[in-house]
Amino acid sequence: MLIGIGTADDAGVYRISEELALIQTVDFFTPIVDDPFDFGRIAAANALSDVYAMGGVPKTAMNLVAFPLQKLGGEVLREVLSGGIEKLKESGTVLLGGHSIEDDEFKYGLSVTGFVHPRKILANQGLKDGDCLILTKPLGTGILNTAVKGGLASLATIEMAVRIMAMLNKYAAEVMSHFPITACTDVTGFGLLGHLAEMISGTGSRVMIQSDLVPILPETVEFASMGFVPSGAHRNRAFRKDMVNLKAGVSPVMRDILFDPQTSGGLLMGCPEGEAQSLVTRLIDNGVEGAAIIGQVFEPDINGDRKRIITVE
């Protein structure tokens, strides 16, 4: 075992030989959009993401389904599975089978196995002083999905959110494989600051986030200002409040966005400062349109607050 449950990494890694290790992960959740085909696409992209975040390539997958067959009918299930298969094909992953049960609450996801070279694994810790932090997808899906449930989001907003959530992190991972990435994770349920806290907790480093550089989906600020913030964002903030120093100019709305739980969010990676802008340019050129440098890693401040190691300005 190279990486197991002892850390907060995105997946487990088991070495098969000097040249090959297996990445294993599993993820599933309840529907977040009304269209069953889109739900399948998003759930599959989300499950595959952990393999990409570890620097690997997904190879095989197994469906996990809990489904109220009498209530929703077989056609809905077929659409969900078809959406998942579309993303598996796009990623080059083979579906081997799966398991289903009848359940009053619908859930869908996948277990995924990927390959990685044992010396090329990307863990979520490993950031070095001077690294730039790069995010590959804009934030806001949790807030937008809350607005959708409230019936306020436009069709254009819904389509945009679905497109972002269904976008594979494959293309970002292919680009970053050509750069000296020091650490990587994907931004999902703990929000940007929650996952960043996992990356630096106990490392002795601190980070500065430039809130005005963080990419945000259109209408996210407006809906957050109206109170359409998921409860998960408040739980994320409460859990990590002692680690985060928000400068006076950072609004409560921006704070909520930085803690907003994402579904199938982007990759958050560290890269040496001299390579960071080239990496962002390559990402954008390869279709990862939301990629941006959002902050930097610094040496510990021996005279500062040892707990508040994330500063947002």
Image (tube, rainbow, N blue to C red):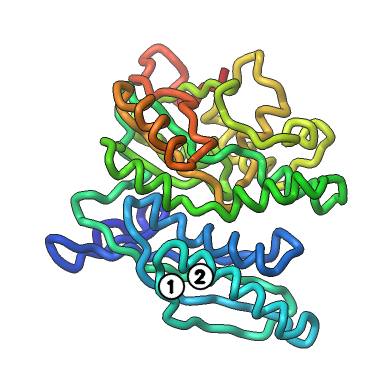
Which of these two is toward me, 162 or 118?
162
Residue beneath the point at 76% across and 84% down: 73
Which of these two is toward me, 67 or 216?
216
Residue beneath the point at 59% across and 74% down: 82
Kindly indicate the quadrant of the structure image that contains residue 105. bottom right
Quadrant (top left/top right/bottom left/bottom right) for the C terminus: top right
Decide which of tag 2 and tag 1 comes sooner along the chain: 1
Decide if residue 177 is on the left or right side of residue 79: left
| Kind of residue sitting beneath label 1 | Ala
Q: Is residue 205 visible?
A: no
- Describe the element under mark 1 as helix, strand or loop: strand
| Kind of residue sitting beneath label 2 | Leu
- The residue labelled by disc 2 is 110
Kindly indicate the quadrant of the structure image that contains residue 74. bottom right
- Describe the element under mark 2 as helix, strand or loop: strand
Kindly indicate the quadrant of the structure image that contains residue 59. bottom left
Which of these two is toward me, 111 or 8?
111
Residue beneath the point at 47% across and 37% down: 196
Mark 2 to mark 1: distance in Å? 6 Å
- Report crowding for label 2: few under 14, some 14 to 19, many 20 or more residues within 10 A (C-alpha): many
Residue beneath the point at 64% across and 72% down: 80
Of the numbered discs in the image, which one, if any, rests on residue 61?
Answer: 1
Decide if residue 197 is on the left or right side of residue 160: left
- Report crowding for label 1: few under 14, some 14 to 19, many 20 or more residues within 10 A (C-alpha): many
